[in-house]
Image (cartoon, rainbow, N blue to C red):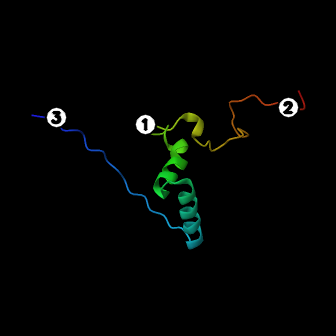
């Protein structure tokens, strides 16, 4: 018996473009001899390739980014 390969799972993503945006996309793709699908995938690859397992800590947004109200840090005082 032959080993069957594992079937790849794909998810569908849809979004709307205006008529002008779609014409621009078609013209750009025909000039570059590519398809809109390949262009979009190539454009977002940088943002999604590193996040397949988990998001690295440097990309998490902190609620209190300036640490103004953090009691654990030493603050400078004008009167000391």
Tell me: residue 52, above or below residue 18: above
Q: Nearer the viewer, residue 32 or 65?
A: 32
Residue at point 55%, 42% (across, down): 46
> Crowding at label 1, few (<14), some or many (≥20) Cα neighbours within 10 Å?
few
> Crowding at label 3, few (<14), some or many (≥20) Cα neighbours within 10 Å?
few
Q: Earlier in the sequence, mark 2 or mark 1?
A: 1
Query: Disc 3 or disc 2, which is closer to the eye?
Result: 3
Assign the C terminus to one quadrant of the image.
Answer: top right
Q: Position of residue 37 (x, y in %)?
A: 46, 55
Q: Nearer the viewer, residue 62 or 17?
A: 17
Q: Judge left or right: residue 72 versus residue 23.
A: right
Q: Earlier in the sequence, mark 3 or mark 2?
A: 3
Judged from the image, the secondary structure of the residue bearing numbered disc 1 is: loop
Judged from the image, the secondary structure of the residue bearing numbered disc 3 is: loop
Q: Which residue has dot 3 on it?
A: 3
Pointers 2 and 1 in contact (CB under 8 A)?
no
Judged from the image, the secondary structure of the residue bearing numbered disc 2 is: loop
Query: Disc 2 or disc 1, which is closer to the eye?
Result: 1
Residue furthest bottom in the image: 19
Residue 77 - label: 2
Residue at point 30%, 45% (across, down): 8
Q: Position of residue 59 (x, y in %)?
A: 58, 39
Q: CA distance from mark 2 to mark 1?
A: 44 Å
Q: Judge left or right: residue 56 versus residue 74.
A: left
Q: Which residue has dot 1 on it?
A: 53
Residue at point 58%, 59% (across, down): 28
Q: Position of residue 39 (x, y in %)?
A: 52, 52
Pointers 1 and 3 in contact (CB under 8 A)?
no
Residue furthest left in the image: 1
Q: CA distance from mark 3 to mark 2?
A: 71 Å
Query: Disc 1 or disc 3, which is closer to the eye?
Result: 3
């Amino acid at each position: 018996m032959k080993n069957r390969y594992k079937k790849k799972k794909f998810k569908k993503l849809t979004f709307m473009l205006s008529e002008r945006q779609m014409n621009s996309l078609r013209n750009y793709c025909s000039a570059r001899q590519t398809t809109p699908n390949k262009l979009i995938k190539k454009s977002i690859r940088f943002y999604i390739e590193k996040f397949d397992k988990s998001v690295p800590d440097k990309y998490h947004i902190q609620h209190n980014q300036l640490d103004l109200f953090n009691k654990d840090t030493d603050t400078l005082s004008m009167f000391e």
